[in-house]
Amino acid sequence: MVSFIDSHKGKFGVEPICKSLPIAPATYYEQKARQRDFTRLPERKQLDMRLKEKIQRIWNENFAVYGVQKVWIQLEREGTSAARCTVARLMRELGLKGAVRGKKCFTTVSDGSNPRPPDLVDRKFKANRLNQLWVADFTFVATWNGFVFVAFVIDVFARKIVGWRAAGSMKTDLVLDALEQALHERTDKDGLVHHSNRGVQYLSIRYTERLGESGIQASVGTTGDSYDNAMAESIIGLFKTEVIRRRGPWRNLETVEFATMEWVDWFNNRRLLEPIGNIPPRELEEMYYSNLENPAEVAGLKQTSLR
């Protein structure tokens, strides 16, 4: 009604319009005053407006992918208490929604003729310490200049991405470069197991020799389905949902590479991950290092089951 009066008051005036509508002129002027000065609003409305500002900021700062649960948890982490239902209501009013996963895509090209390492994981993606188990996989991104392939190496303990690489080819160099970054990132590799699918890149002589040189034990899934490398598939699914599908179309390798770099930094340092207690991977690793005398205390904070 206020907007209707705003649209026609220049021609008819406020009071004449109010005589024909079920609204008093004083009510109209009060509503206009509240638009100019939100402190004149009822206390609940003021609280809602302040919460909306924080919700919008959190959503914007986190790649616009957080849903109600993550926004609500982040508010609590920042010291702002609010009911989850209130956050849900305000996000609806703001038109904010979380990212929704799409269909999976598969890049594995298996070569059954080559010998492969045993499956040391058996779909149990659990680790009680850093550098106990790494998982690796890669995916593809369609661009205007052709396909771009992005490889990841993930430490299972905190689900931190310790190595990644983007390239215009899915040859062995792609996954080997991601591995080299992970080897540079982590110096303690005693007892480390590296798990992957049966892709020819991971079974190549160059890749297996590099694992052996580094004292890393190789593990490869046996059945060849997505469950054999479920954790890597899950994180790649987040990458495709939170970056690739939301920010495309993509021009070329450089644009994908830069976006991946931004996302990995956010994922490792700020993204809340439910399976590790709704904290970022970096935070769990810091807790681990601060409790090296009793790492079981840190391991107990994690939820080791996959979503």
Image (tube, helix red, strand yellow):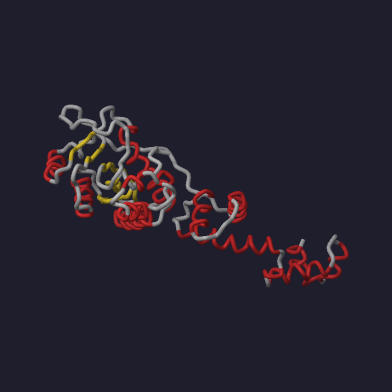
Query: Which one is in front, 90 or 123?
Result: 123
Residue at the far front in the pictured view: 293
Q: Quadrant of the C terminus?
A: top left
Residue sitting at 49 percent across and 55 percent down? 74
**Extreme-right residue of the structure:** 19
Left or right of 33 in this view: 261: left
- From the viewer's perspective, is residue 2 above or below residue 202? below
Asked whether residue 302 appears in the rendered view, the answer is yes
Q: Could you say where residue 282 lies in the image, as x and y percent from the top left?
A: 35, 55
In this view, the residue in front, 171 or 268, is 268
Taking the image as shown, residue 39 lies to the left or right of residue 289, namely right
Residue 229 sits in quarter = top left
Does residue 251 appear anywhere in the picture?
no
Quarter of the image that includes the N terminus: bottom right
- Residue at (22% x, 45% y) in the render: 175
Q: Is residue 24 left or right of residue 141?
A: right
Q: Position of residue 197 (x, y in %)?
A: 26, 35
Image coords of residue 27 (percent x, y): 80, 67
x%, y% of residue 23?
83, 63
Q: How many marks?
A: 0
